[in-house]
Image (tube, rainbow, N blue to C red):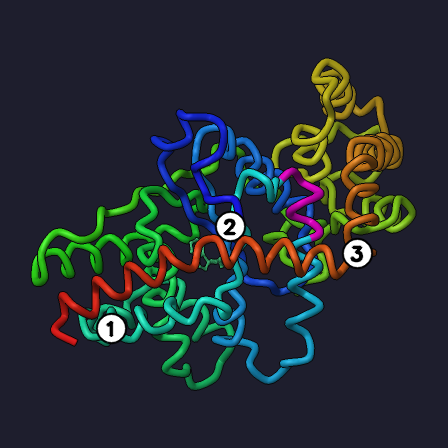
Amino acid sequence: MREIGQDNQPQNQIKRRILTGHRPTGPRHIGHLKGTLETWAKLQDSYQCFFLIADEHVLTTDYEHPGRIQGNILEVLADWLAAGIDPDRSALVLQSAVPEHAQLSLLFSMLVTVARLSRVPTYKEQVKELQLQPSLGLLTYPVLQASDILIYKAEAVPVGEDQLPHLEMTREIAHRFNQIYGQTFSEPEAILSSTPRLPGLDNRTMHTSYGNAILLRDTPEETTRKVMSMYTDPTRIHSTDPGHVQGNPVFDYLDAFHPDHAEVAGLKTRYEAGTVGDVEVKRRLANVLNETLAPLRQRRAKLIARPEYLKEVLHSGTEQVRPIAQATLAEVYAKMGL
Ligand code: TRP
């Protein structure tokens, strides 16, 4: 079995370790690709990367649909690999297959007050959004996430802005642990993605569950249909009216995906002058998306047709990293007097 960081390149041994992950809530969309997956793929050149499928975290809001999780894990894996996550260089890890995450979370939960967790903004938002009595599991979501990171002593965590409160919690837990039991964990830093977040088709946040996302697995026909239905400039009635480019998701997508920046600049100028219609711009965007996504979609189609291969990738990544988790947990047990 290949050991992480012990392959032919000697400089690998000094590579810093990062851990990041997604909850397997469904297939990934073009917002994930631009904001996250392309960044992760690049980070593989300079870091030892662990990519976590956080299936236990799914249960914090979706424990009543156990039938969905296994399929969603494969969907996420196929998207990740198609987007350039390389299982030969990075470990893909299944959270529930490394019980040490949950064990460490129990121990960490002693170091965090209920009041502190109740103030975490993501928790407050979820409680408001879901309009139900929050579970203990939802409250301790950030403690489990801290365990995901610290069980491997990861030094950095590439995340979106929305995850910063969880990283703050992680640093606090590391700090508190070190204070009481002696230096054990470094306080991991965030690696923030520099690409602006892509809005959804309707200009809200792009979200699979809002039905406002273009999925990586969508066919060219679905993509075109979605693009033609996109929100544009609501103040523009006729195609000869001067249009607005700012806050217009059609142009956000063109900026993100069209390799020919000069053509985008030209379209913007004509849009603002009222010499190009929404339909023409959308047709162009649909073609651009379908062209640039085609190679990824081809890889993705091949991967999703091989569930046994995907399971093997996840299994072997998980096997590789588990000894690290076991060692950390043993150290924590001893330090906490167990
Ligand atoms: N909370 C993250 C999200 O919703 C997923 C996640 C779980 C994660 N564990 C993690 C991200 C550890 C980074 C590190 O996107």
Q: Which residue in the structure is indicated by mark 1?
A: 107
Counting labels gives: 3
Residue 278 in the image: x percent, y percent? Answer: 83, 35
Q: Quadrant of residue 42?
A: top right
Q: Is residue 115 above or below residue 275?
A: below
Query: Mark 3 vs ligand 1: CB under 8 Å?
Result: no
Label 1 and label 2: CA atoms lie apart by 23 Å
Of the pair 139 and 251, the residue shown nearer to us: 139
The residue located at (66%, 31%) in the rendering is 256
Q: Which label sits on residue 51?
A: 2
The C terminus, quarter of image: bottom left
Query: Can residue 244 be seen in this snapshot?
Result: no
Reading the image, the residue beneath label 3 is 306
In the rendered image, residue 205 lying in the magenta stretch gets the answer no
First reached walking from the N terminus: tag 2 or tag 3: 2
Query: In this image, 93 relative to 271: left or right?
Result: left
The magenta-colored residue range is 78-84
Magenta segment's dominant SS is helix
At label 3, which amino acid type do we have? Arg
The residue nearer to you, when weighing 115 against 189, is: 189
Q: Amino acid at mark 2?
A: Phe
Q: Secondary structure at mark 1?
A: helix
